[in-house]
């Protein structure tokens, strides 16, 4: 919590009760003064007044699905003060920002003690004189018991509202007007906008190259414990944001978790990585071992991780959810292990020799991915990425059938329900088959591996389709660092920044990457101006 001063003695129980009220979804929470309900489009959020010294305080908060986070505190004196503040409200698809001027001054006269169900001047609400909890379902404002008094809204005709409060220890007036809330840099680029500088985030940015990640994974009891612990998974997601101030936070989870949620057993073996048993290698295996029946129960920890991150990330950072694309997850399920540990002979033999028998596995994974990503978005993900790590091993007709068609179905289903949430698709190593992929899948942004010529991508995707591209620094160049890396980063920025562009790698960060190289990369991109 960010505060301008510590609350006076005896106020901690009040802060807890207000936080509890907000966590139950009843309203915005405040550190001691006002609670506005999410149903009220002009509710004032994140404002507090401590009677001792009349301090105004703000701290980050998010009501899931409705509110953004904000910070910064103002201070007043015993004789009062005036502050300009702001807080966001509204649905993520149509955010508004309340810019508020608040005046705090000493009371003009002693106020009458209020009790539960007190009437407000507007007749819209009551407050619990014991807990300070938000009870109104229309849009009133509540004053905690420790600062008893009378509060009311005074709406006018030009979209401005005045909140007045007269209490036994202070008076407060706040004028609030809703204004468009600026979109985050990454979301602007994903929406097809050429931004003043490219947003930057990195695949596998939470990983073994960071010493704090290693410590957190050990504390969680290993990789499986880390993935299934919302507390630890959220922590490792936040670590690179704290270090490098990146524009996107990619949800920490692992691709094979979707396979495990469908019925396979997932374990991590030293030297082998993820191992899935039993392997799925016939149509009978699909029917016998796989089902959607427990999908969301098994993936519940991931949804909780998204909710934790949604309430924890800085306001400028976009939360990116993700899933493995159906073909890539199928490689894990059929081979029984991570893709890098396999030559994929088993899955290719089945898929190429018996495509109709293999198709039900792709269909099941397509449905699972739609449901998985939908739940992530509902929990707070602001964009999602589909990782097609093994797109490059399929001949062209089968690429169309098992890479393009399933991804197109996922994008279509997500857009029907979440039309403004951008989808990034990353068909790694697709080579010439990148051509047409963007248009056929209708993804908002196409992730480019390190081999894709940026001149082609700029023409075929950015200019011809008006879509965003993402990439594509070679991860080994990030390991090398220094002047050579800086020159290559500059080349990519110049080649791709003429259209909507997100700076990223051509694949995930390698564990041998020095963190200081990542810091230098982030600083260079953040200093760039298109």
Image (tube, rainbow, N blue to C red):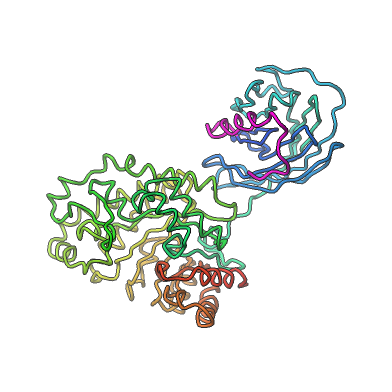
Vertical position of residue 110 compared to residue 351: above or below: above
Vertical position of residue 22 compared to residue 333: above or below: above
Q: Position of residue 375 (x, y in %)?
A: 40, 44
- Magenta-drawn segment: 1-27
Is residue 105 covered in magenta? Answer: no
Q: Position of residue 157 (x, y in %)?
A: 75, 37
Q: Residue at x 76, y 23 (%)?
A: 149
For the question of whether residue 420 can be seen, the reply is no
Q: Residue at x 85, y 31 (%)?
A: 106
Rendering quarter of residue 16: top right
Q: Position of residue 127 (x, y in %)?
A: 65, 23
Q: Tell me how many marks there are.
A: 0
Work out whether residue 162 or residue 132 is closer to the camera in this orientation and state it.
132
Q: Is residue 91 left or right of residue 266?
A: right
Q: Is residue 407 left or right of residue 305?
A: left
Work out whether residue 231 or residue 247 is closer to the camera in this orientation and state it.
231
Q: Residue at x 20, y 52 (%)?
A: 277
For the question of whether residue 180 can be seen, the reply is yes
Q: Is residue 36 left or right of residue 80?
A: left
Quarter of the image that includes the N terminus: top right
Rendering quarter of residue 38: top right
Vertical position of residue 212 compared to residue 178: above or below: below
Quarter of the image that includes the C terminus: bottom right
Is residue 25 covered in magenta? Answer: yes
């Amino acid at each position: 919590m960010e505060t301008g001063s510590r609350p006076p003695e005896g106020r901690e129980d009040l802060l807890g009760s207000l936080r509890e009220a907000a966590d139950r979804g009843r309203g915005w929470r405040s550190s001691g003064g006002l609670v506005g309900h999410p149903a009220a489009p002009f509710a004032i959020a994140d404002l507090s007044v401590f009677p001792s010294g009349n301090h105004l305080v703000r701290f980050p908060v998010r009501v899931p699905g409705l509110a953004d986070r904000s910070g910064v505190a103002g201070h007043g004196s015993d004789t009062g003060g005036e502050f300009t503040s702001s807080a966001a409200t509204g649905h993520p698809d149509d955010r508004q920002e309340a810019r508020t001027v608040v005046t705090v001054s000493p009371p003009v006269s002693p106020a009458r003690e209020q009790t539960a169900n007190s009437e407000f001047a507007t007749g819209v609400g009551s407050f619990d004189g014991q807990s300070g909890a938000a009870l109104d379902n229309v849009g009133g404002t509540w004053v905690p018991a420790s600062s008893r008094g009378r509060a009311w809204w005074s709406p006018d005709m030009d979209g401005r509202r005045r909140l007045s409060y007269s209490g036994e220890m202070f008076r407060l007036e706040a004028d609030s007007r809703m204004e468009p809330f600026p979109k985050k840099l990454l979301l602007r680029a994903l929406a097809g906008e050429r931004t003043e500088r490219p947003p930057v985030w990195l695949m596998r940015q939470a990983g073994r190259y960071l010493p704090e990640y290693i410590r957190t994974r050990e504390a969680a009891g290993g990789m499986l414990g880390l993935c299934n612990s919302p507390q630890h998974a959220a922590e490792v997601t936040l670590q690179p944001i704290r270090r490098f101030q990146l524009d996107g936070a990619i949800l920490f989870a692992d691709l094979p978790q979707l396979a495990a949620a469908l019925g396979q057993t997932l374990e991590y073996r030293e030297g082998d990585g993820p191992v899935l048993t039993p392997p799925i290698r016939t149509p009978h295996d699909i029917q016998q071992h796989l089902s959607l029946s427990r999908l969301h129960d098994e993936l519940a920890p991931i949804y909780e991780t998204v909710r934790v991150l949604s309430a924890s990330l800085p306001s400028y950072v976009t939360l990116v959810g993700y899933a493995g694309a159906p073909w890539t997850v199928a490689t894990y399920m059929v081979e029984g292990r991570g893709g890098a540990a396999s030559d994929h002979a088993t899955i290719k033999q089945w898929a190429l020799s018996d495509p109709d028998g293999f198709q039900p596995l792709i269909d099941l994974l397509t449905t699972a991915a739609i449901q998985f990503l939908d739940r992530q978005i509902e929990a707070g993900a602001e964009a999602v990425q589909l990782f097609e790590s093994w797109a490059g091993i399929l001949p062209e007709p089968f690429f169309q059938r098992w890479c393009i068609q399933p991804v197109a179905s996922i994008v279509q289903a997500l857009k029907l329900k979440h039309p403004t949430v951008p989808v990034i698709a990353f068909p790694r190593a697709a080579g010439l088959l990148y051509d047409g992929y963007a248009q056929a899948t209708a993804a908002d942004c196409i992730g480019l591996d390190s081999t894709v010529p940026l001149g082609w991508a700029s023409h075929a995707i950015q200019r011809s389709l008006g879509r965003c591209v993402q990439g594509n620094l070679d991860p080994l160049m990030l390991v090398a660092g220094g002047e050579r890396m800086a020159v290559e980063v500059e080349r990519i920025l110049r080649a791709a920044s003429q259209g909507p562009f997100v700076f990223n790698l051509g694949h995930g960060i390698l564990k041998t990457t020095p963190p200081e190289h990542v810091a230098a990369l982030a600083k260079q991109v953040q200093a760039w101006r298109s």
